[in-house]
Image (cartoon, grey):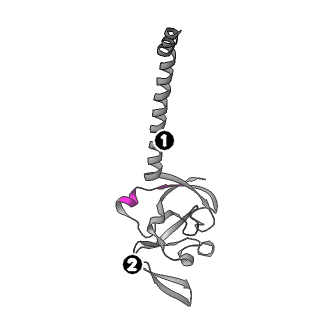
Amino acid sequence: MLGRLSSFWRQEAWPLVAEAGSFGVRWLQLVGLLHCVQEYGIDFSTTVGASMVPVFNASGDVLLFERLSQRLIGWKRGEVIVATSPRDPDARICKRIMGLQGDRVMMGEAGNTREVIVPRGHVWLEGDNKAASHDSRHYGPVPAGLLQGKVRAKLWP
C-alpha cells in the first residue's frame, strides 16, 4: 500500500505539483512586472468633468499618462498632468501646470486680482475651461507629491 502511494506520488502527483508551482511563480512574476510598469511607467485614466474642455471631452476620454520623465527632468509649465485630487484622495484630476515653485501667479477675476507665490514643493494647477474648472484658484497651490504623471495621448475616442 505504501509502495503504491509512493509510486503514485513520484510518477503522477509530483509532476503536476511541480507544474502548478512553476505556473504560480510565472504568474507572480507577471503580476510584479505589470505592477512596476503601472507604478513607474505608464497608466491610464478617464476624464470626468468639463475642466479641460475643449482639449478633452467632459467624460469618457481615455488618457495615457507616463510617470517616468518627471522623475528624470521634472515638471514644466504648460504640461497637462494627472494628479491625486487635493480634496478627495480617491479621485484623480486632469489639469494644466500654470506655475511652479517660486512663480508668481495672478488669482481672481478682472478688477479683483491678487498675486500668489507658489510655495516650495508645490505647483499651481488650472483647467483650460476656467468657468467649469475646480482648481488651484479654489484650493490653492497643490503639493508636487500629488502629481502622478504627464498626459501623453488621448487614446479614446
Neighbourhood count class around disc 1 (C-alpha, 10 Å): few under 14, some 14–19, many 20 upward? few
Image position, residue 133 (x, y; %): 60, 72
Image x and y of residue 46, in percent: 59, 56
Depth check: 17 or 38 in front? 17
Residue 39 lies in the magenta-colored region: no
Marks 2 and 1, how far apart in space?
Answer: 41 Å
Residue at the spot 46% in from the left edge and 24% down from the top edge: 18
Side of 16 where 74 appears, left or right = left
The residue mark sitting in front, 2 or 1, is 1
Query: What residue type is disc 1 on?
Result: Val
Residue ID at (48%, 41%): 31
Residue type highlighted by circle 2 = Gly
Farthest-out residue, left: 72
Q: Secondary structure at mark 1?
A: helix
Could you tell whether 52 is left or right of 67 in the image?
right
Question: Considering the image in quadrants, where does the N terminus appear?
Answer: top right
State whether residue 108 is above or below residue 132: below
Residue under the image location 50 percent in, 16 percent down: 9
Question: Mark 2: which secondary structure?
Answer: loop
Q: Report x, y in % for residue 15.
A: 48, 19
Is 70 a magenta residue? yes
Dot 2 alpha-carbon crowd within 10 angstroms: few under 14, some 14 to 19, many 20 or more: some
Q: Which mark is residue 31?
A: 1
First-in-chain label (2 vs 1): 1
Residue 34 coordinates in the image, percent (x, y): 47, 44
Look at the image and give the residue range highlighted in magenta.
Answer: 63-71
Mark 2 — residue?
102
